[in-house]
Amino acid sequence: MEALEELERVQNRVLQRIASLELSLLPQRFADTLSVSSPAQISDANGDTEARLSAILRANNVRDFAFKRVPFDYYDWPIEARRDILGAPSVHHLCKSIVLVNTQAPSNVTDCSDRNNSKYYIVVVQYTARFNAETVKNFLYSLNNGKIPKKKFNLRLAPEESSQKLTGYEHNGVTCIGMKTDIPVILDEAIVKLDSNFFWLGGGEIDLKLGIKTSEFINFVKPFIVSCSGI
């Protein structure tokens, strides 16, 4: 039964993306009069991801942001093509959010209630960068003033099932806005140093991307800013 339900969800997503792509190819005067709704959106208007996240952002004084739908095969495209469809200044402005789990956390650390010593973290890094878990380990060790042995920090990619359960988002759709769990966020310092003060990341759905002003993201999310990558 679960397999059939998952197949139905996949089929609905595929049909939704095909319809969105067809709509994008229509002349603008026709496209402006049409909209595409998935079965979930029809049955529950409150389930609209873009509307929900937009409301969260505006409620937290974020004003400079944008959502953009991308084709269903977006992740099969070269990164330069992805840059162009989003209108990003460079490929370095395309970022992703990855959920990490501390596999060596003490037995009493099981959730995200202590942002300084959390079981999970979500890290925002550039697609063009190579994430360095060792720098995050060193940062957390220093953050706790050396009171927790360094060997108790071992950050690894969380299983996809855990990531989805914690965030409420699928792989390639993960964003640190509106997560089910208040996971502490680590923002790579390289993103802060980008020209234009604006970057793109996942928007809560596989084919939905969120562009946001970096300074407003920082003011709202209040991430740890750590140099944790190399290009």
Image (cartoon, rainbow, N blue to C red):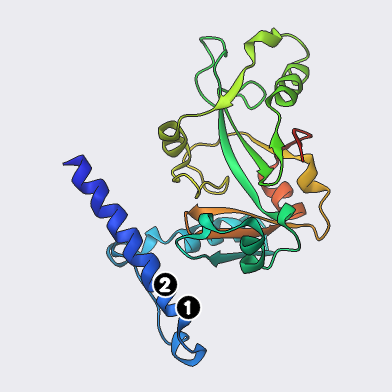
Q: Position of residue 90 (x, y in %)?
A: 75, 59
Quarter of the image that includes the N terminus: top left
Q: Residues within 10 Å of mark 1 (few under 14, many from 20)?
A: some
Q: Position of residue 148 (x, y in %)?
A: 69, 9
Of residues 109 and 28, the one nearer the viewer is 28
Q: Amino acid at mark 1?
A: Ser
| Residue carrying label 1 | 24
Q: Residues within 10 Å of mark 2 (few under 14, many from 20)?
A: some
Residue 196's x, y, as percent?
81, 61
Label of residue 20 in the image? 2
Q: Is residue 106 left or right of residue 213?
A: left
In which image quadrant can residue 66 be found? bottom right
Q: Secondary structure at mark 2?
A: helix
Residue at the location (21% across, 42% down)? 3
Residues at discs 2 and 1 in contact (Cβ within 8 Å): yes
7 to the left or right of 132: left
